[in-house]
Image: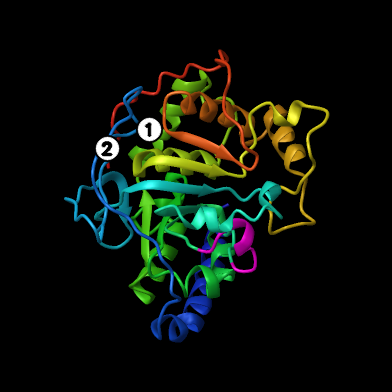
Amino acid sequence: MKMKIRVYQGVSGIIIVTMVTSLMLVYNSGFGDRSASSSSSSSSSPASRRLITPVSSTKNPERPQRLRALEGYTGVTDHKSLKMHCKTCALVTSSAQLTGRKRGQEIDRSECVIRMNDAPSVGYEQDVGQRTSLRVVAHSSLQRVLRSRQELLNASQDTVFIFWGPSSCMRRDGKGHVYNNLRLLKQLLPRLQIYIISRIKMLKFDELFKKETGIDRKSSNSWLSTGWFTMAIALELCDRISVYGMVPPDFCRSSTHASVPYHYYEPSGPDECSMYLSHERNQQGSHHRFITEKTVFANWARTLDIHFYQPDWKPVAVITSTNSSYAPAPAGS
């Protein structure tokens, strides 16, 4: 097993060095013209306190605000806390529910646009917009992001990247292969804004899942999805969240639901509802609980400024299968 890990780390390092070296000339010659803003302050919903106290932000050209740091998201080389805040956010999922709907301009009108993993915008601008302020990336998606380096890295001066992963991947003692690769990437491309979620913060996300669902993530063989992390992070960064492409919790249990690909950029990929249902029902091995997570999001939307578009829906009745109180303590860094 140790030999396999070393081989994997060695191959991963070689891939990154090769890819990063090849794009440095393009990257350093200038970035694409992307508009992404963030500003700093703190606010809370009158109905319920936010997940982890919302703070922080960067500059607002109209009204400069005092910067405050978000705990638990640290720079990969300088270990400084993330500073970011947005009044309005468009959280764009990777679902093919967005295909052909032409909501791109609407999405780009938000102060901040949030995307996940390696979901592209080039070639899909009419449906998903073209701006990216924040990209939340799973440890398992690092190589795919590097393969899409021309768009996702070369034109990302204004994009903040937050990577999440288990502590074994993110440890800083030389044995965390994802952290090592991100540190190398940051050294070679110093203008990239790369942050990682701390171990303590990751534990807080687990605690939140258990509090909201009554389910222990580890004992239930569950992995939190990138969608879970992205929604929770958005609650810290944004005053208002518009979610694009997320279906309601009961959508896939209807016999009349539309069949669409899981990813808008993979038209031949797996069916979205087949993916959701197979993961939700599986009790062996580690799987995401997509439908359970969406049930939590629907509960949050009853008291927080969260809205769902494409499909357009809102929670209409109290869902009693979760324990949504949504007032966890602030997470440490």
Determine which of the numbered discs, if any, sits on residue 332 in the image. 2
Disc 2 residue type (three-letter): Gly
Does residue 32 lie above or below 78 as drawn?
below
View extreme (left): residue: 66
Exactly how many numbered labels are in the figure? 2
- Image quadrant containing the C terminus: top left
Q: Indicate yes or no whether the magenta region holds residue 128.
A: yes
Span shown in magenta: 122-130
Q: Label 1: how many residues lie within 10 Å, few (<14), some (14-19) or many (20+)?
A: many
Marks 2 and 1 in Cβ contact (< 8 Å): yes
Circle 1: residue type: Lys
Between 190 and 128, the one lying in front of the other is 128
- SS class, disc 1: helix
Q: Is residue 254 above or below residue 180?
A: above
Q: Position of residue 265 (x, y in %)?
A: 69, 59
* Secondary structure category for the residue under label 2: loop
At a point 33% along the width and 29% down the height, the residue shown is 45
Image position of 278 (left or right of 199): right
- Tell me if residue 85 comes above or below residue 232 in the rendering: below
Residue 125 rendering spot, x and y as whole percentages: 60, 64
Give the residue at x 42% y 77%. 31
Provide residue 158's location: percent of width, then percent of height: 38, 66
Q: Which residue is mark 1?
A: 204
Residue 252 position, x and y percent, is 74, 31
**Residue 33 image-quadrant placement:** bottom left
Q: Nearer the viewer, residue 123 or 168?
A: 123
Residue 305 inside the magenta-drawn segment: no
Query: Does residue 116 appear in this view?
Result: no
